[in-house]
C-alpha cells in the first residue's frame, strides 16, 4: 500500500513512472474483475486500460489520503458493468438465476483438494456466474472476488445497502406462478 | 485441508482466461504519450493545424452539401442493411450472399463490408424454431463466432446486434480484414438458440465495392440549434439527434437518450426505453416512421449511459423542419423515488391465508402509492411463505419491487404484476419460514413512464 502512495505522489509530481508502478500492482486484478463482469477477455483489457487512463487523467483530483485500490476497483467495476449492460441488451438471462447455486459451488471450491475437481468447479462457477444479469454479476464479483463490504458495494453501485442484499438474493421473480391459485386472496 | 478463500477461487477461475502474463503497461503508456505529444505541440504549428483542419471541414461541408449549414460531414457512408462504413477508405463488400444448410437449418450471410476499421456481416437463420437461448452455447467456452483468414489468423467477434425483424437476424462485427486479404471463413461454434447444429464454417469472399456508393451520413454538430432536447427533471434524461442518413427515398434519423454524468458513473437509472416516438412535419402532420436497427457500436465509448435509436422516414419532400418527439420513456430505476419505509405488524402467529388491511399512502418524490392490503401466502413454486401486497398507484407506475429491511437478505423479491393500470401486486418470499411480528419494508425500485416530450428538429 505504501508503494501505491509513493506511486501516486510521483504521479502527482509529474513522474509518469508512478503510473507504471500502479499498473504493475493492480492490472491483473483489474482485468480479471472486468472479465468476471463482462465475460469478454478483450473487453476486460479495454476496461482496465480505460480505468488506468482515466485515473491518470484525473490524478490531480485524487485525494492521496484515500486508499487507491478500492477507489480504482470501483472504477473498474463501473466501467465493466456499463459495458456488460450495454452488450447484454436484448439478451434474456436464465429465469433460474438464483445466486445460491453459485454460492454452493463456491463453498465446495474453497475446500476441494483434488485439482481436477477444483478446475471443474471453477468452470461450473463461471458458467453459472455468466448466466446472471450483469448487475448481479457485479455484486457477486465485488462481494466474493474483491471482498468488498456491503456498504462499499452499495456506494459503488449507487444503491442502498438493502438493495445489495436484494441483488444478492434476487432469484428471478415468479409472481405469475405465485398469483395463480392465490390471486383471489387479495 | 488447504482451504482457499473465495477471492482465490475466483482469481483461479479467471486466470484460465486472463493469464498472469498479461501486461497492459506498454499500450497504456503509449496511449498517454501520444496524447501528451498532442498537448505539447508547438503553438504556432498547432494554430496552423487548427486552421487547416477547420478549413478542410469547411470545404468538405460546404462544397458537397451547400444546403446544410449547421451540420458537418464526417467521412461516413451508409449501406442499407450493413450500416455505416468508413467511406473514405477503399471499401470492400461481400462478393455474393452465402448460405449453408445443416440438418434443416440454414445460415445465410446476406451482406458484408470491410472498411478501414471493421468487417461487418449481416446474417439470418432459417429453419430454426427454438426461441429460447441455448445457455450452454451462450455462456460456454468459445461460443462466439470468429473469422479465420487464409493464413490461420483468427479475428474475434467484437460485437453483434439484432437487426430484426426476428431474433435470427443479426449483424456481426469483426476487426477489418487486412489489406490484400479478400477471403475468410466465418466459423460459428453454435447458434445460441435451442439445440441447433454446431460447427459452422462458411467461406466468404470479398471484392471491391465497384459501382456501390455508400449513402451520405451527416454527423450532426451537437451545437446545432434544435438537435438537443434538454434534460428532463427529475431523471435528467436528455435527447440528442446524432446522425441523419440521406437515403434515396427518405431519411434515417439516429438519436440517443442520454442520462447520468456522461463519464460512466452509475446513477440510479437502470434503463431507459422509449415508449412512444413520433416524427411530424412542420405542419404538425405525423409521418410514418419505421424503426431500424441503430448502427453505432463504436460511437462515443466515453458515454455509456445512453440508448440509441434509429427511425426511417420515407419520402424526400416534406414540410421542413421535421420534429422527432420522444413522447415518453420507460425509466427503470433503483431507490430513486425517495420512498420511505413502511411497517406491517403480522402479529405473533400469522397464518397462511391471513390478510391485513393497510390503507395507507406511501409518498415518494414523484408518485404516491396507496397500500391497500397484504396477504400471507404460500409460494406454489418454492413452497415457502410469502407476503403479497396489493398496491394502487397512478397509471404511470408500471412495475416495482419491495425489500424487507429486516430479513438480512433471506428473502426473494418478486416482480410485480401490473394486472390493470394503476393496480400492482408485488410479493416477497421468505427463506426462514413464516415471518412474524412487526416487519419493515421499502420500495427498492420501480419502473415508471416518464413523460418528457423530448423534441429534436432537423431540416436539410
Image (cartoon, coloured by chain):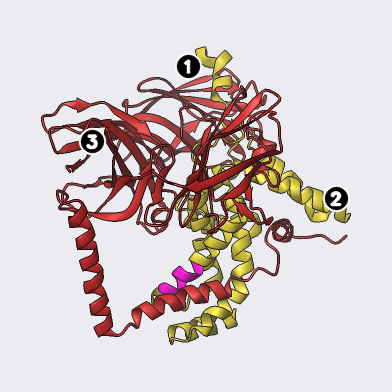
Instruction: Say if mark 1 contacts mark 2, CB within 8 Å.
Output: no
Which span of residues is magenta-colored?
Answer: A51-57
Image coords of residue A11 (percent x, y)? 47, 83
Q: Main secondary structure of the magenta part?
A: helix
Tell me, yes or no, whether dots 3 and 1 are on the same chain. Answer: no
**Relative to B59, is B362 above or below?**
above
Q: Nearer the viewer, residue B3 or B101?
A: B101
Chain letter tied to red: B
Q: Which residue is mark 3?
A: B325
At label 3, counting other C-alpha atoms closer than 10 Å, the crowd grade (few under 14, some 14-19, many 20 or more) is some
Q: Can the viewer see residue B408?
A: no
Instruction: Assign the C terminus of chain B to one quadrant of the image.
Output: top left
**Tag 2, which secondary structure?**
helix
Tell me, yes or no, whether dots 1 and 2 are on the same chain. Answer: yes
Disc 2 is attached to a residue of which chain? Answer: A
**Tag 3, which secondary structure?**
strand
Mark 3 or mark 1: which is in front? 3
Left or right of B17, for residue B264 = left
Q: Which residue is mark 1?
A: A186
Is residue B305 shown in magenta? no
Q: Colour of chain A?
A: yellow
Q: Which residue is mark 2?
A: A117
At label 1, counting other C-alpha atoms closer than 10 Å, the crowd grade (few under 14, some 14-19, many 20 or more) is some
Q: Nearer the viewer, residue B306 or B112?
A: B112
Amino acid at each position: 500500500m505504501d508503494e501505491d502512495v509513493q506511486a501516486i505522489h510521483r504521479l502527482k509530481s509529474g513522474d509518469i513512472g508512478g503510473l507504471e508502478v500502479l499498473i504493475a500492482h493492480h492490472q491483473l486484478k483489474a482485468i480479471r474483475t472486468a472479465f468476471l463482469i463482462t465475460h469478454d477477455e478483450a473487453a476486460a483489457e479495454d476496461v482496465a486500460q480505460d480505468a488506468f487512463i482515466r485515473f491518470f487523467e484525473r490524478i490531480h483530483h485524487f485525494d492521496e489520503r484515500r486508499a487507491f485500490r478500492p477507489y480504482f476497483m470501483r472504477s473498474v467495476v463501473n466501467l465493466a458493468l456499463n459495458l456488460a449492460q450495454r452488450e447484454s441488451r436484448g439478451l434474456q438471462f436464465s429465469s433460474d438465476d438464483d445466486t445460491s447455486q453459485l454460492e454452493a459451488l463456491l463453498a465446495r471450491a474453497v475446500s476441494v483438494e483434488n485439482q481436477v475437481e477444483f478446475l471443474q468447479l471453477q468452470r461450473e462457477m463461471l458458467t453459472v456466474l455468466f448466466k446472471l444479469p450483469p448487475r448481479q454479476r457485479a455484486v457477486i464479483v465485488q462481494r466474493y472476488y474483491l471482498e468488498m463490504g456491503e456498504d462499499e458495494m452499495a456506494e459503488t453501485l449507487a444503491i442502498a445497502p438493502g438493495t445489495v442484499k436484494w441483488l444478492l438474493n434476487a432469484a428471478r421473480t415468479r409472481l405469475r406462478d405465485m398469483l395463480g391459485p392465490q390471486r383471489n386472496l387479495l | 485441508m488447504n482451504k482457499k478463500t473465495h477471492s482465490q477461487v475466483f482469481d483461479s477461475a479467471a486466470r484460465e482466461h486472463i493469464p498472469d502474463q498479461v501486461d497492459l503497461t506498454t499500450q497504456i503508456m503509449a496511449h498517454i504519450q501520444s496524447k501528451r505529444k498532442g498537448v505539447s505541440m508547438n503553438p504556432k504549428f498547432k494554430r496552423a493545424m487548427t486552421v487547416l483542419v477547420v478549413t478542410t471541414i469547411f470545404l468538405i461541408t460546404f462544397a458537397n452539401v451547400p444546403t446544410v449549414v449547421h451540420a458537418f460531414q464526417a467521412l461516413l457512408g451508409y449501406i442499407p442493411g450493413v450500416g455505416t462504413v468508413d467511406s473514405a477508405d477503399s471499401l470492400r463488400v461481400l462478393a455474393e450472399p452465402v448460405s449453408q444448410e445443416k440438418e434443416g437449418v440454414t445460415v445465410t450471410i446476406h451482406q458484408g463490408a470491410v472498411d478501414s476499421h471493421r468487417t461487418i456481416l449481416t446474417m439470418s437463420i432459417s429453419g430454426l424454431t427454438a426461441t429460447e437461448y441455448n445457455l450452454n452455447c451462450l455462456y460456454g467456452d468459445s461460443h462466439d463466432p470468429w473469422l479465420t483468414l487464409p493464413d490461420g489468423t483468427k479475428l474475434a467477434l467484437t460485437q453483434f446486434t439484432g437487426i430484426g425483424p426476428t431474433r435470427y437476424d443479426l449483424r456481426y462485427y469483426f476487426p477489418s480484414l487486412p489489406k490484400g486479404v479478400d477471403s475468410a471463413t466465418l466459423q460459428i461454434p453454435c447458434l445460441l438458440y435451442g439445440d441447433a447444429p454446431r460447427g459452422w464454417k462458411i467461406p466468404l469472399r470479398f471484392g471491391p465495392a465497384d459501382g456501390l456508393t455508400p449513402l451520405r451520413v451527416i454527423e450532426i454538430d451537437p451545437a446545432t440549434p434544435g438537435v438537443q432536447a434538454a434534460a428532463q427533471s427529475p431523471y435528467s434524461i436528455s435527447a440528442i439527434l446524432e446522425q441523419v442518413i440521406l437515403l434515396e427515398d427518405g431519411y434515417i434519423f439516429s438519436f440517443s437518450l442520454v442520462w447520468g454524468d456522461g463519464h460512466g458513473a452509475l446513477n440510479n437509472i437502470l434503463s431507459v426505453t422509449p415508449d412512444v416516438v413520433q416524427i411530424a412535419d412542420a405542419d404538425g402532420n405525423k409521418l410514418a416512421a419505421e424503426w431500424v436497427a441503430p448502427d453505432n457500436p463504436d460511437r462515443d465509448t466515453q458515454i455509456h449511459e445512453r440508448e440509441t435509436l434509429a427511425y426511417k422516414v420515407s419520402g424526400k419532400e416534406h414540410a421542413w423542419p421535421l420534429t422527432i418527439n420522444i413522447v415518453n420513456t420507460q425509466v427503470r430505476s433503483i431507490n430513486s423515488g425517495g420512498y420511505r419505509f413502511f411497517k406491517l405488524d403480522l402479529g405473533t402467529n400469522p397464518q397462511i391465508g391471513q390478510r391485513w388491511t393497510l390503507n395507507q399512502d406511501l409518498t415518494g418524490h414523484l408518485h404516491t402509492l396507496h397500500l391497500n392490503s397484504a396477504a400471507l401466502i404460500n409460494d406454489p413454486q418454492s413452497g415457502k411463505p410469502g407476503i403479497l401486497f396489493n398496491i394502487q398507484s397512478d397509471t404511470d407506475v408500471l412495475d416495482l419491487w419491495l425489500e424487507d429491511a429486516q430479513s438480512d437478505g433471506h428473502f426473494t423479491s418478486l416482480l410485480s404484476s401490473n394486472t390493470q393500470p394503476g393496480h400492482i401486486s408485488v410479493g416477497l418470499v421468505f427463506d426462514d419460514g413464516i415471518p412474524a411480528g412487526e416487519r419493515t419494508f421499502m420500495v427498492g425500485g420501480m419502473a415508471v413512464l416518464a413523460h418528457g416530450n423530448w423534441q429534436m428538429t432537423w431540416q436539410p
